[in-house]
Amino acid sequence: MKEIYVSLDPVEISYIQAMLAEQEIDVLVFDQNMSSLYGDNGLFPKRLMVVDEDYFMAKSILDNLDLNAE
């Protein structure tokens, strides 16, 4: 698995997931529940992960979305 994006913004995370799902790229969200463990303070960014085979396609899609991809 490779990290393709990190964000504190849940709307941005959902948007990217939807864009990648349209291209049939499965995305896992890591650290999704970390903030809730500490009072849902939003201090822990969520990480989007894809399998190695989908990494370059996912990065290309993110670049076309004009986001600050990692």
Image (cartoon, helix red, strand yellow):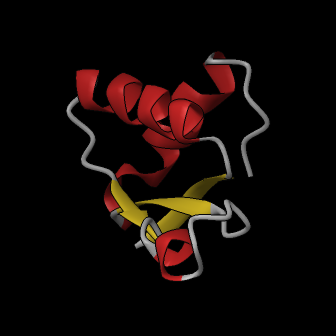
Judging depth in this view, the residue of 60 and 19 nearest the camera is 19
Quadrant of residue 52 within the rendered picture: bottom left
Which quarter shows the N terminus? Answer: bottom left
Q: Residue at x 51, y 77 (%)?
A: 34
Q: Residue 35 appears at what percent x and percent y? A: 56, 71
**Quick check: 59 left or right of 8?**
left
Q: Residue at x 79, y 36 (%)?
A: 68
Residue 29 position (above or below residue 11)? below
Determine the residue located farthest toward the bottom in the rendered image.
37
Residue 69 position (above or below residue 18)? below
Q: Residue 55 appears at what percent x and percent y? A: 46, 53
Determine the residue located farthest toward the left in the rendered image.
24
Judging depth in this view, the residue of 36 and 16 nearest the camera is 36
Determine the residue located farthest toward the front in the rendered image.
39
**Quick check: 1 left or right of 42?**
left
Q: Residue at x 56, y 61 (%)?
A: 46
